[in-house]
Amino acid sequence: IRSLKEDVEKSGLEVETAHDYAEEYIKANSIPKSPDVKKDDGKHYVYFEYSKEVSGTKYSYLTCVYDNVNEFWIVSFACYKEMYSEYKSDFFAAADSVKFVEAEK
């Protein structure tokens, strides 16, 4: 999900950082148990983890928020809750590999 910072500002939200944006995203989407937004040393994003039941099936999520110049990006990873510990390191490896490249004009 990509959000231009200009549009976020126009919406009336007071968001300065990826951390702020993640907290607003959690509130706006009624994410269960209001997970803590975290940032590990050396990471170029903040993230939060949560679990949610959808149509009787339990899922776990890793949601990463990136601050890229004039926009925020959200990248989410999901799997069955019972498989999360197996895939968590793969999700973080994929999140670490995200790069933003300026398009040629």
Image (tube, rainbow, N blue to C red):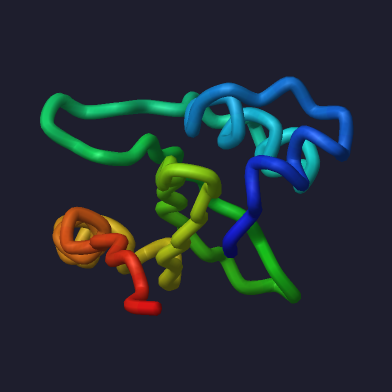
Residue found at x 74% / y 21%: 14
Q: Determine whether 104 is above or below 81 in the image.
A: below
Residue found at x 36% / y 74%: 103
Residue found at x 64% / y 31%: 33
Q: Determine whether 102 is above or below 31 in the image.
A: below
Q: Where is residue 67 in the image (x, y as percent from the top left)?
A: 43, 41
Q: Which residue sits furthest front?
A: 105
Q: Position of residue 59 (x, y in %)?
A: 52, 64
**Apparent side of residue 10 relative to residue 102 in the rendered image (left or right):** right
> Would you identify the image quadrant in which residue 45 lies?
top left
Q: How many marks?
A: 0
Q: Determine whether 14 is above or below 48 in the image.
A: above
Residue in the foreground of this view, choosing between 82 and 95? 95
Residue in the foreground of this view, choosing between 55 and 19? 19
**Apparent side of residue 74 relative to residue 97 in the rendered image (left or right):** right
Q: Where is residue 43 in the image (x, y as percent from the top left)?
A: 19, 37
**Apparent side of residue 76 relative to residue 33 in the rendered image (left or right):** left
Residue found at x 21% / y 65%: 94
Quadrant placement of the N terminus: bottom right
> Would you identify the image quadrant in which residue 35 lies?
top right
Quadrant placement of the C terminus: bottom left
Q: Position of residue 3 (x, y in %)?
A: 64, 54
Residue in the foreground of this view, choosing between 82 and 39? 39
